[in-house]
Amino acid sequence: MSRSLTTAENAKARTPRVSRRVAVTALAAALLAGTATPAVATPAGTADSRAVPRTATGQDRPELQKAIQDFVDAGFAGVQMRVNDERGEWVGSAGVRKLGASAKPPTNGRFWGGSTTKAFVATVVLQLVAEGEIGLDAPVAGYLPELGLDRRITVRMLLQHTSGVFNYSGEFYLDGTFVPGIPSVGKEWVDNRFHAYRPQELVRLALSKPAKFEPGTNWSYANTNYTLARLLIEKVTGRSLAEEMKRRILRPLKLRDTELPGNRTHIRGPHAHGYYRYEDAGQWKVVDVTRQNTSLLPAAGDMVSTTKDLHTFFSALNGGRLIPATLLAEMRKPHPKSGGLFGRYGLGLYVQDTGPDCVGTLLNHNGSVGGYGSLMYSTPDGKKTLTASITSGDAAIDPARAFPKALDKLVKDVFCGGKAAS
């Protein structure tokens, strides 16, 4: 399922009866139906957790260990999670690193980050806005005239998913019809998961389809918006997005395990395996999709990262270290027509109201890409964060039920002291 919160998120409020497996809710859609063979969840691992202080071990935060074990019990293969708060740093994992093996996921493991990529890309765009290189409310066509974009589409609309452009991995229209794009689910994706795509071909495919709505009149999550943002960054700076991310974010924050791998299909360094369960000629099959080409999601979900790097980035962003306060405030203004499991959408992040019994506003951008899901949460001051990676396995589960329930409990345990969040 090489996509990052795409068709499922566009349809989360109405879930047309096209395919239950395709149109399930948000991140759960891409985590797939799967789990590992039974395994015992334990605190931070041996070899890859020696640097974690004793006060951060799983025994000291049993509610966090229980919360990630709930994902495994619900049917997912494995979880690695990092929590940074007033009690320090906690790192733990549950489940298995690979089906048929007993080792649990490495707590310092790399993973396909999916749509967490979008928060990085939005940050780069807003840095260029701060420098006067890009106008937030300027027409994108002024920077990319060769694409023939509707001149009403602005840079802000790309970052907020209000442009109305067709989602190149498939689109649900307002009348309930579904128009397919590049295959991102099922056997078609499995068979083509190593194919290399160019951003320009994906954008041109999207622009060849009817717009979902008039620019700025509605909201719909579309990966095309962020692929356009990549082309915008590269046109304005004269450098690749990978170079700009390194120069502006990765090097200053010393994010040594985060990268845009391009057409490389493997994850370097320690990592857990992700699996995809799909139907083929009436038979259910499971395939290891740890190796895949994420060029299907350029700037929309093609990043590799770790829980440590995601924590460092999201804490720095929300702590005001990456963009000016005025633009951070713009980033956190959610569009009134957006919504769903993760809250309402601002510019490259979701804004979730957890209510007075919790922390109030909670910021996040989660993600998914074939067999892998990622979580990235922070309080507005960046001082309390949750970052995690979740892998799918081989069991038949209903992710539309299992994932939201486990996620809700996890967010409550980390940010609300176990209390109900709104």
Image (cartoon, rainbow, N blue to C red):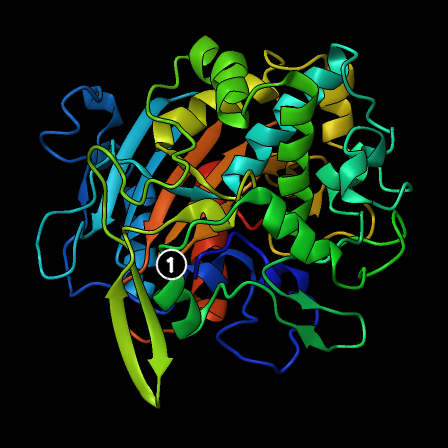
Q: Nearer the viewer, residue 360 or 48?
A: 48
Residue 45 percent location from the top left of the image: 14, 35
Residue 152 percent location from the top left of the image: 91, 42
Quadrant in the rendering for residue 267: top left
Q: Residue furthest front?
A: 146
Q: Secondary structure at mark 1?
A: loop
Badge 1 crowding class, 10 Å Cα cut-off, few under 14, some 14 to 19, many 20 or more, is many
Q: Is residue 362 above or below residue 9?
A: above
Please indicate, yes or no, whether residue 394 appears anywhere in the rendered image. Answer: no
Q: Is residue 80 left or right of residue 22?
A: left
Q: Quadrant of the N terminus?
A: bottom left
Please indicate, yes or no, whether residue 376 appears anywhere in the rendered image. Answer: yes
Residue 248 percent location from the top left of the image: 54, 14
Q: Which residue is under mark 1?
A: 193
Q: Residue furthest bottom?
A: 282
Q: Residue at x 51, y 66 (%)?
A: 183
Residue 177 percent location from the top left of the image: 72, 78
Q: Nearer the viewer, residue 83 or 132?
A: 132
Q: Is residue 204 left or right of residue 34?
A: right
Quadrant in the rendering for residue 303: top left
Q: Residue at x 42, y 35 (%)?
A: 387
Q: Residue at x 69, y 44 (%)?
A: 225
For the residue marked with disc 1, what is the amino acid? Arg
Q: Is residue 277 left or right of residue 152?
A: left
